[in-house]
Amino acid sequence: MALGINRYKARVSCRGLLHDEGASAPRDILDEFSHRPWHANVRCGWDGVSLWLEAENDYDANGSALLDEFSDAVVACIKASGTISFAVDFAHEVVHG
């Protein structure tokens, strides 16, 4: 990694999915994000209540861009049977070294 380039890590989440909808979703969401090389260290999981995604990039200090892409991927990959909501759980600068 080049010196002087800021890196940011964010975690975003989706709530309102049923267990069956959320439990199988991480695989599909990770597949979607494998085609988005501008995000690094991508992780996705289901904790029984929310579907979450973490990623790092060099441009999204507040997590809003990641949230936008995540919500698009969730809507494309999951046929939610109810109302779902999205949120940025955290976003911060990553200090490597």
Image: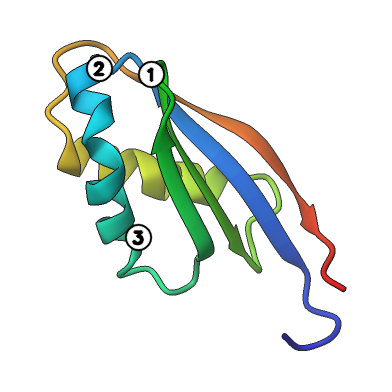
Camera-side residue: 67 or 50? Answer: 50
Q: Could you tell me the amino acid type at mark 1?
A: Gly
Secondary element type, mark 2 = helix
Under circle 1, the secondary element is loop
Residue 47 lies in quadrant: top left
Q: Which residue is mark 2?
A: 19
Is 50 drawn above or below residue 43 in the view shown? above
Q: Alpha carbon of mark 3 to alpha carbon of mark 1: how far?
A: 21 Å
Residue at 60%, 60% (x, y): give it. Answer: 56
Q: Dot 3 lies on which element?
A: helix
Residue 1 point in image, percent of width and height: 72, 85
Question: To which residue does mark 1 refer?
Answer: 48
- Badge 1 crowding class, 10 Å Cα cut-off, few under 14, some 14 to 19, many 20 or more, is few
Tell me if label 1 and label 2 are in contact, CB under 8 Å: yes
Q: Which circle's residue, 1 or 2, is located before the other in the chain?
A: 2
Alpha carbons under labels 3 and 2: distance apart: 22 Å
Tell me if 45 is positioned left or right of 3 in this view: left
- The label nearer to you, 3 versus 1, is 1
Percent across and percent down for residue 8 are: 70, 58
Residue kind at label 3, given as amino acid type: Phe
